Image (tube, rainbow, N blue to C red):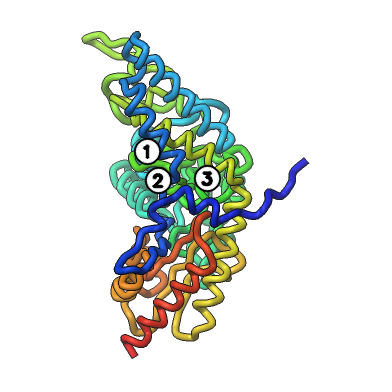
Amino acid sequence: MSHQAPPLDVEHLRGDFPILEREFDGTQLVYLDNAATTQTPEPVVEAIVDYYRRYNANVHRGIHQLSQEASIAYEEAHDRVAEFVGADGREEIVFTKNATEAENLVAYAWGLNELGPGDEVVLTEMEHHASLVTWQQIAKRTGADCRYIPVTDEGRLDMTAARELITDATRMVSVVHVSNTLGTINPIAELAEIAHDHDAYIFVDAAQSVPNRPVDVTELDADFLAFSGHKMCGPTGIGVLYGRRHLLEEMEPYHYGGEMILRVTFEDSEWNELPWKYEAGTPPICQGIALAEACDYLDDVGMENVERHEAALAEYAYDRLTERGDVEVYGPPGDDRGGLVAFNLEGVHAHDLSSILNDSAVAIRAGDHCTQPLHDVLGVSASARASFYLYNTRAEVDRLVEAVDDARQLFA
């Protein structure tokens, strides 16, 4: 029987993140750049330190005790991440250096071999460059075409257009789950059904969803899915590619070298079993172990709690900003979005606004957020973005709005 987890004890959780106590010129930090990178809790830091202090060794290459301990921990990390996203075992979980590399892995290992003239890759106008640029360039190399599902004035995907664009010529649909600019939560399962009806695959950019809400690859019916460790309380330097086992078995490797081989002769090579087939060279051992610890931490908090908390903060921020009259917030209404708000203050460039907020120790992101084509659609060159996580509070949103007031006065 499902049950709703209790509310977050945010003040208690903040104790796991000492960086949040930092002050700048006597003013306590307000960290609202979580869509770029979340902070790392003490249990994850301790897992990193424990690895380097107690069993730092390369994996799968030594019979000695340290290597055995590292190998077991690294392999079990794949099991833990697989459990976290509902995958069918470690064979479907490949560790990469980030979500971008995961996208490139599929684009090169599958796309270069499978796409050709007459084939189409369908993306959306809200794609992160990690998806858009990757498939754009693969299409140029293979003669395939990229088509883009438009975004409505409210910041949602035009699903009528999606059904028209995804045809029997479509081979891959690559779509962001939660937009890192608009906060839009896209209907992945519906898009997967449309794609599969046309014998196409679907690749889900889950960099802004796996860290922030419950995600199950089976429920989404995803063929591939990517996310990054550093956006979910984990370390930098590690990303995850989920892929259906039969697809990963059929595809050729993306990188070659040690670890990913079973046998090598002067004439040819045989590939290792999954997932090691795609993890050439020394892998991100410590990062993988720490990512598993991050999964434990988030499960202890409760992903339903994280989602609910972020949604409440995003709605509060949306309401506080839009009630001003001189701020434009992009994307769907405040009660139907992921945990971020991208906006512009009338007459103030986003970079200037970010600098002024920094003077008040409020950390946000400003720029195009790796979504330049989307900003072209919005008709702006840049936007400011405040993004929330499990340790943020309503009081910090108030600090954000107060800092926006300061910027308004400076540019009045």
The residue at which mark 1 appears reads as: 238
* Mark 2 or 3: the one toward you: 2
Q: Which of 215 and 25 is in front in this view?
A: 25
Residue 331 placed where, x, y %?
51, 68
Q: Quick one: label 1 or label 3, which is nearer the N terminus?
A: 3
Q: How packed is label 1: few (under 14 Cα within 10 Å), some, or many (20 or more)?
A: many
**Disc 2 and disc 3 in contact, CB within 8 angstroms:** no
In 3D space, how far apart are the residues under numbered discs 2 and 1 (Cα atoms)? 7 Å
Q: Is residue 264 above or below residue 232?
A: above
Q: In which quarter of the image is residue 148?
A: bottom left
Q: Residue furthest left?
A: 266
Count of marks overlaid on the render: 3
Q: Residue furthest front?
A: 26
Q: How packed is label 3: few (under 14 Cα within 10 Å), some, or many (20 or more)?
A: some
User: Mark 2 is on which residue type?
Assistant: His
Q: In this view, does 410 lie above or below 154?
A: below
User: Mark 1 is on which residue type?
Assistant: Ile
Label 1 residue SS: loop
Q: Report the disc number at residue 168.
A: 3
**Disc 2 and disc 1 in contact, CB within 8 angstroms:** yes
Label 3 residue SS: loop
Q: In this view, does 270 lie above or below 327?
A: above
Residue located at (55% from left, 40% from top): 222
The residue at which mark 2 appears reads as: 230
Q: Quick one: label 2 or label 3, which is nearer the N terminus?
A: 3
User: Mark 3 is on which residue type?
Assistant: Asp
Residue 46 placed where, x, y %?
41, 36
Residue located at (21% from left, 10% from top): 266
Q: Which residue lies furthest to the right in this view?
A: 1
Please say whether residue 316 is visible from this viewpoint: yes
Residue 4 placed where, x, y %?
71, 50
Please say whether residue 114 is visible from this viewpoint: no
